[in-house]
Image (spheres, rainbow, N blue to C red):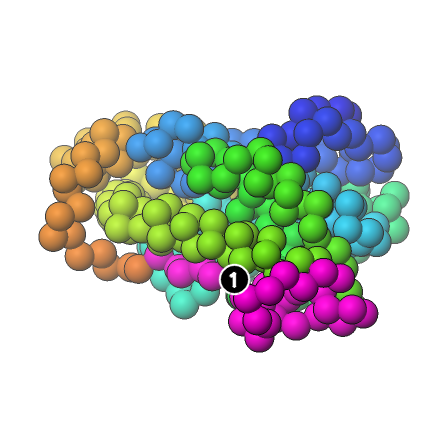
Amino acid sequence: MRWDDRVYGDVAIEDPRLLALIACPTFRRLRGIRQAGPSAFAFPFKTVTRHEHSLGVFLLLRELGADLREQVAGLLHDISHTAFSHAVDFVFSSEEQNHHEQLKREFLERPDIVAALGPLGFEPCEFLDDAVYPLLERPLPWLCADRLDYFFRDGLACGVATQEAVAWFLAHLTVVDRTIVFTDALVARQATALFAEMNRDWWASPTEAFIYNEFADALRESFRLGVLRKEELLADDAHVLAKLEAASSPLIAEKLDHVLRFDPRRINGFVPRVIPKTRWLDPPVQVGSTFRRLSELSGESVAG
């Protein structure tokens, strides 16, 4: 399996056991789930899928020297995302906005995933908690493969980051004590600034708050009317959208219109029911054989 990845360029996966996992219907489902959720309708250049991102996290973990189990954890970390990704978190809201984590056991224990994990020597229970994999997952504001890949991938899609900038960031990443760090403070500052721009203008912007809340209203009404069952969120975007568009509901039609034909003027005075999660970085920077947080360093570049 060889392809031209938008972040990492020409890449390949040759291990037949990994290829069998990637070929599972449960994993292939991620091809039909947009990483940007309903926002991808308003901004068609947001073409990243959960499938693409999951492969990207695997590739980054492999590049950083993660063992096979953590690489597989990277492939499976988003396996339970519902249709339209985080849109469900605006219906069943929580502080972390990670409803899909509650569904992970169900997806990991599907027969096709179990059968594919067998030849790799792993059990589904080994991938329930991503927190046990420090290169894959760390809390904000640390670096981790998941956070870095969606930053690079979304940044390129939205035109905030360039290929040259992403290549520069990747060239200055290393691992110290099972922690992903930048090898230079200047690079860390540049990445932190671009990450903040992505959060301000895209991930947590008033535009995203409007789009996600309007779409969540359409989902709530569809549940109330029985047009859509909550279990159907375990399908893909196309299935859920078809159900919403077929509903004979003026409210659902209105909310969908606000998303599908987004008008920036509607943001004026809009008060969201749910606020998008805010993201930020304070990345560790290599200092000799250890590291310090960027906020702890002076303004001078610190090489590893």
Confirm whether the magenta stretch covers residue 259: no
Q: Position of residue 53 (x, y in %)?
A: 59, 40
**From the viewer's perspective, is residue 182 above or below residue 295?**
above
Q: Quadrant of residue 136?
A: bottom right
* Residue 129 appears in the picture as rendered: no
Q: Position of residue 16 (x, y in %)?
A: 85, 32
Give the structural element (helix, strand or loop) at label 1.
loop
Confirm whether the magenta stretch covers residue 280: yes
The chief SS type of the magenta part is loop
Q: Nearer the viewer, residue 249 or 201?
A: 201
> Residue 67 vs residue 163: left or right?
right
**From the viewer's perspective, is residue 67 above or below residue 282?**
above
* Residue 55 appears in the picture as rendered: yes
Residue under numbered circle 1: 281
Residue ID at (53%, 47%)? 151
Q: Position of residue 41 (x, y in %)?
A: 34, 31
Residue ID at (58%, 33%)? 163
Q: Residue furthest left?
A: 269
The C terminus - image quarter: bottom right
> Residue 294 vs residue 280: left or right?
right
Q: Nearer the viewer, residue 287 or 271?
A: 287
Magenta-tinted stretch: 276-304
Q: Residue furthest bottom?
A: 296
Q: Quadrant of residue 278?
A: bottom left
> Residue 92 vs residue 59: left or right?
left
Q: Nearer the viewer, residue 169 or 117?
A: 169
The N terminus - image quarter: top right
Residue ID at (64%, 43%)? 168
Q: Quadrant of residue 89?
A: bottom left
